[in-house]
Image: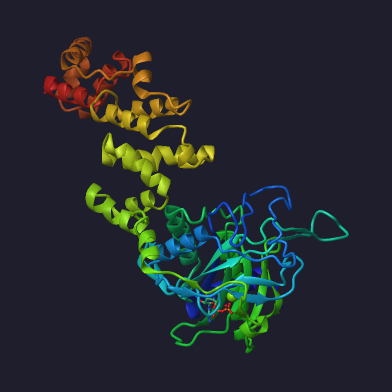
Amino acid sequence: MDKLSKESKEYLIKREINEYEVVIGLEVHAQVLSESKLFSSSPTKFGSEPNTQVSLVDAAFPGMLPVINEFCIKQAIKTGIGLKAKINKKSVFDRKNYFYADLPQGYQISQYKNPIVGEGSVILDMPTGEKKVNIERLHLEQDAGKSIHDIDPQSTLVDLNRSGVALMEIVSRPDLRSLDEVNFYIKKLRSIMRYLGTCDGNMQEGSLRADVNVSVRKKGTKELGTRCEIKNVNSIKFMQMAIDYEANRQVDIIEKGGVIDQETRLFDTKKNETRSMRTKEDAHDYRYFPDPDLLPLELNDVFINDIKKTIPELPDEKKKRFIEKFKLSSYEANILVSDIETSKYFEEVSKNSDVKLATNWITGELFALLNEKNLEIIDSPISSNNLAKLISLIKNGTISGKLAKSIFEMMADGDKDPNKIVEEKGLKQQSDPKELEKIIDKVILENPQNVKSYKSGKDKLFGFFVGQVMKRSGGKANPQLVNEILKKKLN
Ligand code: ADP
Ligand code: MG
């Protein structure tokens, strides 16, 4: 029943587009960028040997007490401000009780009724225009340990390095309507948190994961359909595949007259399908209650205002400024602000050269180079300083755009200074009209037949003359000047 044949799946996708609408709400778990855990001073470094970052608190030894990490609180508040959300002056830590081998406390410390951050919103720059996604809340909680099933065939191993690591759970309203919107939403959240330095957004390392809630309904219906929640999906692509599968599964059930059971499901990345894990538990199953080891968290205005003062310019504001100050298109601005490092690089290059050329060279040649070498812009083989120099050389006519491309390639090998390359290889563009005239006169003198044909109307021959001049100059003649002078001489 869960598995659909390929044909029926394709058919369903078509049917869904026509008649059904998919409704998605995400619970994103973002690991707080912090050197120590939420309630202990253990380090949080990724990739350490198993069970080397575990204090007695993280292993839940009897009598150990949690001590709140002020830095993590600040990070959550920063993120809340970045989500244009209400910061709650009073919040409460609760125990969420359940048993699992990698949860030594027997409960997770989380926030239930009184989260640290309330309602906010995120703007998505969709190709079709802006879309607002409402945020329900952001709360702090501790991560559990990790169960490892694939090392020992006989038993499951437990690694408590993650136990107690601070997570921010960011819950969206069921406002997302397509796979594309999910993609834009996750990227925007990640971008905001990276600007703020509150989460590194590294999905491969599990710093950003989501529980994906999916329901379907007939288009035009007001009420929401029954949802299924797909747990712990750790890449955008898997989120999209899981939603696609899940939406089709639900439409299929409804079309056959069935009803959707509210379930918690798993996405099997190998089989590309979702599978039932358990019927959805309700909040009361967890026996939430305020953790008696922790006082309610009370924040005063001074504390919150001091944090507000540290908030940098965020992507939306930066985009606005780029459009106004640099006259960029909305499309260009989106590309340049989406990643904070890219925006810094762009500002450095354009400050010392030319905005238009900087935009084109960064989004064109540089992105292609980074892509090819699989590098982030922060590790770019060409520094912003040297790219600015290259652009200045184009701008002041020292080199042609075409030549600049080959110089760019040479620069990539060890961040070479383009001025030096031009000098060493004698690549300077010939822009002295007197010198060019000499070459042009020679070419005209040596080709009387072609001059005659050109003058009698064979316009196409103009290219021949340009070609000859370029050849004689070793490719260095300024093509624009050559055109101008040739036109004057031949007419
Ligand atoms: P729980 O904490 O039990 O998972 P919540 O009410 O907090 O439940 O909702 C969790 C997520 O489910 C939110 O992101 C919300 O937007 C989403 N959601 C709620 N109802 C639906 C629905 N009918 N379809 C899709 N998503 C939904
Ligand atoms: Mg949930």
Q: At x 81% / y 61%, what residue is drawn?
A: 156
Q: Residue at x 19, y 21 (%)?
A: 453
Residue 175 picture location, percent across and down: 45, 75
Could one spot residue 133 in this view of the protein?
no
Quarter-of-image position of residue 119 = bottom left
Camera-nearest residue between 62 and 482: 62
Locate residue 102 relative to residue 12 in the image: left or right.
Answer: right
Residue 226 image position (x, y, % from top left)? 57, 84
> On the rendered image, what quadrant is the C terminus found in?
top left
Residue 140 appearing in the image:
yes
In the picture shown, does residue 59 fall above or below 96? above
Q: Position of residue 198 (x, y in %)?
A: 48, 56
- When the figure is inspected, residue 100 is found, relative to residue 149, above or below; the finding is below
Image position of 338 (left or right of 27) = left
Q: How many marks?
A: 0
Q: Residue furthest front?
A: 63
Query: What colour scheme governs how the chains and residues are painted in the rendered image of this protein?
Result: rainbow
Residue 244 occupies quadrant: bottom right
Where is residue 235 shown, x and y percent of the image?
58, 59
